[in-house]
Amino acid sequence: MGRIRPHRRNSYGNQLKALPMEAMYAAGVSVFSLVIYGAVMGVSVYMAGETPKFVGGIGMLGCFLALAAFLYNVAQMKTKTELKYRLICLAVSTLAMAIWVGTFILGMVN
């Protein structure tokens, strides 16, 4: 039996567009990258900036996860699923990328 995707129905019983599950998963990856961001920042503050190299590697992994999720959500805008949810997922991914890029720009300036 095939995988059944959730569909919404209006009050008249007509079938509406499917929810963008892939975009929602990508937004979840963006949120996870923000959890990584918080952990890396917390370790950096706790260790007063004297962090091991692997913490920077974990930070780069989080940045690449956020970038991949952002690019995936941009590509999801072409699908024929519910627009409101696609825009919300894209906004979450954009926020995560803005936080990562803003941190890197601040690091380059200082």
Image (spheres, rainbow, N blue to C red):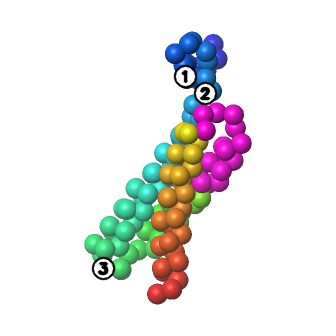
* Mark number, residue 89: none
Image coordinates of residue 29 in percent, x first then y, are: 51, 48
Q: What distance separates the C-alpha of mark 1 from that of mark 2?
A: 7 Å
Closer to the N terminus: mark 1 or mark 2? 1
CB under 8 Å between discs 1 and 2: yes
Residue drawn at the location 54% of the way across and 61% of the way down: 97
Q: What distance separates the C-alpha of mark 3 from that of mark 1?
A: 51 Å
Callout 2 amino acid: Ala
Residue that label 2 marks: 18
Q: Secondary structure at mark 1?
A: strand
Give the magenta-colored segment's residue range.
68-83
Up-down: is 92 above or below 45?
above
Up-down: is 48 above or below 14?
below
Residue that label 3 marks: 48
Q: Main secondary structure of the magenta part?
A: helix
Comparing 95 with 47, the one in front is 95
Camera sees residue 61: no
> Residue 81 magenta-drawn?
yes
Callout 1 amino acid: Arg
